Amino acid sequence: MRKVSGRTKKILNFIGNDKKLQILDLGCSGGYQTDQLGEINYGFDPDDYNWLHKNLVEKYENVTGVEITKIHADIMNEQGFEVVNEDVQNFNLNKKFDFVVAGELIEHLIDIKGFLNSVKNHMNSESKFIITTPFANSLFSFLYSLIYWPRSCSNDEHTLWFCPSTIKLTLETYGFEIESIEPIMDYRLTKNFSIYNIFVILIYAFYPILPKRLKCNGMMVVSTIK
């Protein structure tokens, strides 16, 4: 059995082992995928062992997904998942959840106000909101910008770029209270030779001596509603 990615493992560990929890997974078909050869791709692959939504459903009994791409939502529902075809920036399921998860999603959005207000409508005073997103000030991001300037982001679909200060301000502006911000490490080698692969090999080679905020390329942010 393959190990799941750093961010997927972090989210599962944080939520815990109570299988009865009500979990809402936003943008549930997206993110980067890893095929059987280890190659990283972008898009939807229902067989991906790193797919966050699949891992959530395998561990918990009550998982609902929200997905804007209709064909992806249809495929997932055909496979037995419970997925609603809605825009995460404006949706209402008329239900509260114990955990709302947005894995590698917020950096793709335009209407942050609509998104965060929609999230709040599905939380109660005990609910937790979990975000994972790239870390804009990571060593990887810095070197990428240095090498490829003026291209400063490796994903052309990213509209937003967060560091701990900006994600904290954004969430607090829309009525959330930060519980924790943790750097996470989520690198995977591709099968083709690349500068990225060289960087990842060096990160793991010097892993014991590098400060966490340098070797990590993402953040996990947990918040509650005020």
Image: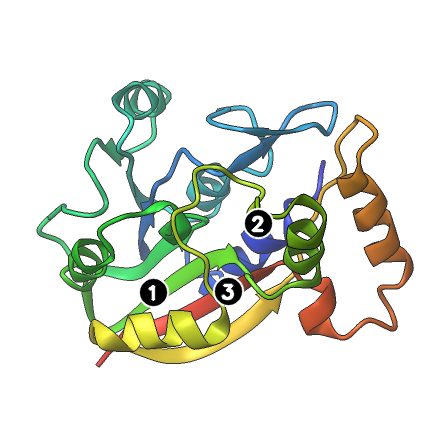
Mark 1–mark 2 distance (CA, rounded to whole Å)? 28 Å
Q: Considering only order in the chain, which callout, 3 or 2, is on the residue closer to the N terminus?
A: 2
User: Which residue carries the number 1 mark?
Assistant: 129
**Residue 14, relative to residue 181: is it above or below?**
above
- Estimate the x, y position of residue 171 in percent, counting from the top left: 30, 71
Q: Considering only order in the chain, which callout, 2 or 1, is on the residue closer to the N terminus?
A: 1
Judged by depth in the image, the label closer to the viewer, 1 or 2, is 2
- Three-letter residue code for mark 3: Met
Q: Nearer the viewer, residue 135 or 81?
A: 135
Q: Is residue 1 left or right of residue 84?
A: right
Marks 3/1 in contact by CB < 8 Å: the verdict is no
Q: Secondary structure beneath disc 3?
A: strand
Marks 2/3 in contact by CB < 8 Å: the verdict is no
- Estimate the x, y position of residue 219 in percent, counting from the top left: 54, 64
User: Which residue carries the number 3 mark?
Assistant: 220
Q: Considering only order in the chain, which callout, 1 or 3, is on the residue closer to the N terminus?
A: 1
Other-residue count near label 1 (Cα within 10 Å), few / some / many at <14 / 14–19 / ≥20: many
**Residue 19 in which image quadrant:** bottom left
Q: Residue at x 34, y 76 (%)?
A: 169
Q: Nearer the viewer, residue 191 or 48?
A: 191
Mark 2–mark 3 distance (CA, rounded to whole Å)? 21 Å
Q: Residue at x 22, y 54 (%)?
A: 115
- Three-letter residue code for mark 2: Ser
User: Which residue carries the number 2 mark?
Assistant: 152
Viewport quadrant of the N terminus: top right
Mark 3–mark 1 distance (CA, rounded to whole Å)? 10 Å
**Residue 189 in which image quadrant:** top right
- Three-letter residue code for mark 1: Phe
Q: Nearer the viewer, residue 15 or 60?
A: 15
Q: Residue at x 55, y 47 (%)?
A: 153
